[in-house]
Image (cartoon, coloured by chain):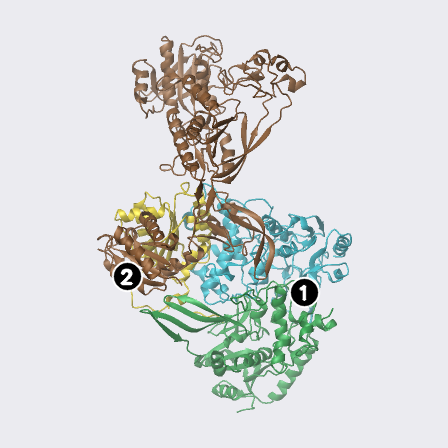
Amino acid sequence: MQRIGVFVCHCGSNIAATVDVKRVVECARLEPGVVFAEDYQYMCSEAGQMKIADAIKREGLTGVVVCSCSPRMHEATFRKCAEGAGLNPYMLEIANIREQCSWIHKDMETATEKAVVLMRAAVAKVNLNVPLKSGESRVTKRALVIGGGIAGIQTALDIAEAGYEVDIVEKTPSIGGRMAQLDKTFPTLDCSACILTPKMVEAAAHEKIRIFTYSEVEKVTGFVGDFTVDIRKKARSVDIDKCTGCGVCQEKCPSKTAKSEFNRGLSKRSAIYTPFAQAVPNVPVIDREHCIKFKTGKCGVCSKVCPAGAIDYEMRDEIITEKYGAIVAATGFDMISLDKYDEYAYKKSPDVITSLELERIMNAAGPTGGHLERLSDGKPPKNIVFIQCVGSRCADKRGKSYCSKICCMYTAKHAMLIRDKYPDTNVTVFYIDVRTPGKNFDEFYRRAVEEYHVNYIKGQVGKVLPQPDGTLLVQGADIIDGRQVLINADMVVLAAAIEPDPTARKLATMLTASIDTNGFLTEAHPKLRPVESPTAGIFLSGVCQGPKDIPETVSQAGAAAVKVIGLLSKDKLLTNPCTAKADELMCNGCSACANVCPYGAISYEDREVRGIGVREVRRVAVVNGALCQGCGACTVACPSGAMDLFGFSNRQITAEVDAICR
Amino acid sequence: MQIEKTAHAAENKEWKPMIVAFCCNWCSYAGADLAGSSRLSYPADVKIIRVPCSCRVNPMFILRAFERGADGVIICGCHPGDCHYTTGNYYTRRRMALLFSMLDFIGVENGRTRVEWVSAAEGAKFSATMNEFTAKIRSLGENVRLGDLRCRN
Amino acid sequence: MQELKKRLCELLSDGTVARVLGWRRGETSFDPEPAFFGSAEELSDFVYDGFCGANLSKMMIEAARLEGKTAVCLKPCDTYSYNQLIKEHRVDREKTYIIGVGCRGKLDIDKIRALGIKGILSISGTECDGDGDTLLIKTVYGDKSCKYADAMLSRCHVCRGKEHKIYDEIIGESRDTTDGDRFSEVEKLEAMAPRERFEFFRRELSRCIRCNACRNVCPACSCRKCVFDSNNFDSAQKANVDPFEEKMFHIIRAFHVAGRCTDCGECSRVCPENIPLHLFNRKFIKDINTFYGEYTAGEDAEAKCPLTDFDFGDAEPGDVTSGR
Amino acid sequence: MMGGIYGISKDRLEKLFSALAAERELYLPVMSGGKVNFSVWEEGEDVRLDVTKTAKSPKDAFFPQFETLYTCRTEEGKLKIDPEELCRREFVVFGMRACDAAGLRVLDRVFLSEPVDTFYAARRELGTIVSIACGEPEESCFCRAFGIDAASPDADVAAWFSGERLLLKPQTEKGTRLISSLSEYLTEADGAEAAIEEEQAKIRAITEKLPYSLLSLEGWGSGETKRKFDSPLWEKLYRPCLACGTCTFVCPTCQCYDIKDYKTKNGVQRYRCWDSCMYSDFTLMAGGNNRTTQLQRFRQRFMHKLVYFPENNEGTFSCVGCGRCVDSCPSSLNIVKVIKAFSKDGGDE
């Protein structure tokens, strides 16, 4: 039997004005298990807390009920107080007689009656409480960053700067990501490469950072503080240690038919290649699909010309297994496929391009050497039409319901750059809305309109029709003037929606991190925990969590890094003791609980089970306390009631029900 | 030979509905707190039990409440998609849809059970829901079809 | 049956299996009991006829603990249960040799008694490989007869088909026995007023004696310890004390097997008080089909149980009950 | 009036029931949901005296499946105990069979021996039994094996259907009182002795032909307890047992019960309810259970009925051969199979 103390708070007049606290105290004294009850002006005050602490010691209390404000307010306060007095903090429960009683009821009689019932329910629960102890788990002081774009690089650098080891896994041959493909960045118009490449180099050179390019995460097990990850290093066919990055192999390679991924397929590359000149590491890979040696067995030119003898056709995929304390997802984005947008003639005309393709065209290292020209005939375009929200804010299934966020700004950038460099080019932008919330963003957009005279038309484009003369007839609507607009354009640029990188979905499954309907990784709380996944130890950096621009990405990358650092700085993690646990003797091993666990916290083991008249090996559910977050989904899925939740046990809740209903 | 008892003859006291509300810790309990701090009243007949997630609510608890004389049971959780534990309320939704349908099937008035999604920001909705639900229960009257009469002793 | 018996003997003697799970001839021609047979000699008592209605799949949980392989005779409907047990890791497929036995509907001695036939001494025409549709019944009060179909268990009239969902080999022919709609009883109740439904269930459940036969025979109720036998919810009870306790027991039992129940009908078959317990399960099956799409528990050993699954667009509990 | 025989025509039975029920509670076999069970009679119910066996035995008129023993409650922090009142109303159980009446004798041995079970004793005192001879015994009947004569029930009033008449013969003082109170409806039956004898002869002739009637109980009863207990046959016999309580709960002689508490608003209601030796928590104690396997539990049931009970009760078996368990076992297991298995080879295999 417990020895319970009940403490009723007046909360000044907040409670006492509507609840007869003395009567609550009197009723409490009659409850089974209650050995002490008193009331006080402000239980949360130092003097109030002293009363609780003193009573715990003096009366030898084994349980405490505080009738006061919401547990969301002061449960932690009172539990800490109880702990200070030598009582297990989980032996204390709150009866919420303020928010759920005194504040909503006017009649003293009614409110008091309800307060007594709430007190009884809390007492009934405490009668069944058991001391709980947080478990401890160790922390591996190394972080894994998945994705080597600006988000991943920044996160890795920040973590490394704090002194922790960090590995970056990047699936392409070089880090750099989307930002490396950009020409200029808004709203400052500084060169993307100029600000990114130093960071890439810094990351590569950092003694705490290891970079696995051309690699993918294969398997993740474990939990916060103690993940085990298998990384597949795809066969590069070039020895990274021997290669000097001289580039001879790429020059001499006879197979030059592959489309350059980096240039969005607008140019060709050799079968042995680095994606771009500033690649980190500056070590090529052999694209085995296009390599003549791999296809026919004959060739081997690269091997012959390599002065360092770095070419290794025999190289195989390698699996590296490493332990990590935290994992950051920074898988970034891609543009949606425009296959279903026939009306814009993207597939039909080479002069209808996406914004990212325009970035490459405008870039000095791009397919046209930085000259703005039509891909069909190489002529400079005189009329360019930009179409916004292609697949963004889209009501139908072809596109995305969300705003891709960056398109308004980069289109303003493109328009401005074109007007600046080629003043005789007409630039028209069709838009639904122009959204420019960001530091210096609206000013930037205004400049495009006012200084550079970019022709912004509010309205959508219905059709782009390639004309026999090679021009493109753009049929749009101007909804402000309420008229149809026909433009003969030389080039049409589509601001295609961005979507999470396709690998994110698979990764989310591996990490048991949740994703939303659009495939973006979900944050633990949209406002208060925006860089954490609901799955402990998994953090989110960059566009994998939702559309964002570079400054936002970098700040989120930093924020994720801080969370990781905070985690890695601990030697041990305290686990939430209100976790589920299966009674081995009753467990059927049926897997129903594991099927509903959102955290992958339940596994099955063949264990020897011992009980009265029982001694056999059975398949039983085992809950990993470090992973379990205590939602209780498993407890209801379990038909036998073998699975129960500490702190909210079946018997505790039943007792509360009984106490309320009697 | 079934031992059957009929409902107690009208007790002298006026009948007041007894309503059990299970609220998830993260959204609905906070919503109830907000209703409180906004002084949005609802009947004292509603008594809240805090659970970590609506998916913690076992049908056993609901039937137990009815057995012990509750006249109505309401379960409140985060809106679908907003569950603190990502998926808990989706399971609640299925479980309760089936359970409520079954209760309806055996002839229990289907207004006695309810699931409502209430976010931490919806204090007003919480209060309105509880007012509405209590009114519904009042109109249905005392629960005689599910109660175990012994608990009234 | 001879072919089946011969094959079972072979399996035992060539060492494929260590034992056979089937039915042993009883004292009369209508009380065979489920039994394990360890040798060809023991098999002389083996029987498989119209009265072998018991679903043996649940006994395979026990068999999984025994040394060596067990050959089990499963009727088409039993194979659903077996699949479901695989899904729940309760049986060991590796240690099972499934003989899919033919079925032309199983008989219910109570149905015969309900026809006013008393003092039954023996019944012929019950063979599984026979194709007569009349049963000849010898009684102390003279010879009687009845239609095979009239003596069939209710469940056989709404059989889901005679296809074995899992087996190693099939022996014997099956015959379609379906002549009713599986959900018509449920629909009939649904169409009644709540008050009438309540009276119906009160009347039916008031006969419950809490013998637990329905639970103990149920292949989905395979819990090592039932919640109603444990104190986990303060719910240990064996008394039928008050009308509500039976409701609680039967509702929770049906809820626990929802999405897992294969509608094998054993619960109703064994109820000594003739309570139509299958109505609860069928109601859940019907609801699951309506709300979440057609689902047949035990059709395979992989599909996710609807109650441990969800869809973002699932119906709200409120819509579900008011929608009718 | 003792010794006389009274008759009533079948079509006036309904009137008789009304008269009986007006003064006291009347239990009759009533059909509901396709099953016949004894229940407190109300006007218009489907009374089925022609059905030989009710699904459940009528023992719960005397020993209900559930009954409250006392109630504790706290008032102002003080504990109060309200003992449950003993039965004070008279009642009649009409239509019991000879086996059921014999079953009560078994219960009497348990509940009326010291210490007397006052709840049972009070009901036994106030209950009058009218038992009807079995006009159409069924194949699962084997009361004869236990020396029970289905043709002449041992009860307060014995009754026989004869043509369109029901003949009633009071056999005890209670029975005589009951019959005299019904004089308005009954007539002294002429030539009844002969009619009864004729009916009895018919019943006995049928009983002869029933498959289990000649079941031999040789070797059962006291003695050789250990040999039977250790018999390897149990291992084979128990296998199909589902561990349900059907056999126990339909049985007219099973007397085990459990005592439990039900939490009420401000205390507990202590009640007892039938228990079954087939259940895993039967006789469960803090330190565990002395029978941990189903084999042991299964064996207990039959050893108790056929060995332990006769050992302690001058050879009386705790089975009356009503055959309800034979009819209702989901696995077609039953006491007949057990008795026969042992009689073949004495249980040594």
* Chain name for mark 1: D
Q: Residues within 10 Å of mark 2 (few under 14, many from 20)?
A: many
Which color is chain D depicted in? green
Q: Give the chain ID for the cyan colour.
A: C
SS for tag 1?
A: helix
- Foreground pick, D140 / D220: D220
SS for tag 2?
A: helix
Q: Quadrant of the C terminus of chain A?
A: bottom left
Residue C234 shows up from this direction: yes
Query: B75 left or right of C2?
Result: left
Q: Which amino acid lies under the numbered mark 1 shown in the image of this protein?
A: Glu
Q: Quadrant of the N terminus of chain A?
A: bottom left
Q: Which residue is mark 2?
A: A25
Query: C127 left or right of A424?
Result: right
Does residue A543 sit above or below A529 in this rendering? above
Q: Position of residue A154 (x, y in %)?
A: 42, 26
For residue A570, the mark is none
- Foreground pick, C130 / C49: C49
Q: Which amino acid lies under the numbered mark 2 shown in the image of this protein?
A: Val
Q: Position of residue A199 (x, y in %)?
A: 43, 22
Whole-number angstrom distance, CA of label 2 to CA of label 1: 62 Å
Q: Which residue is mark 1?
A: D235
Residue C113: which quarter of the image?
bottom right
Which color is chain B depicted in? yellow
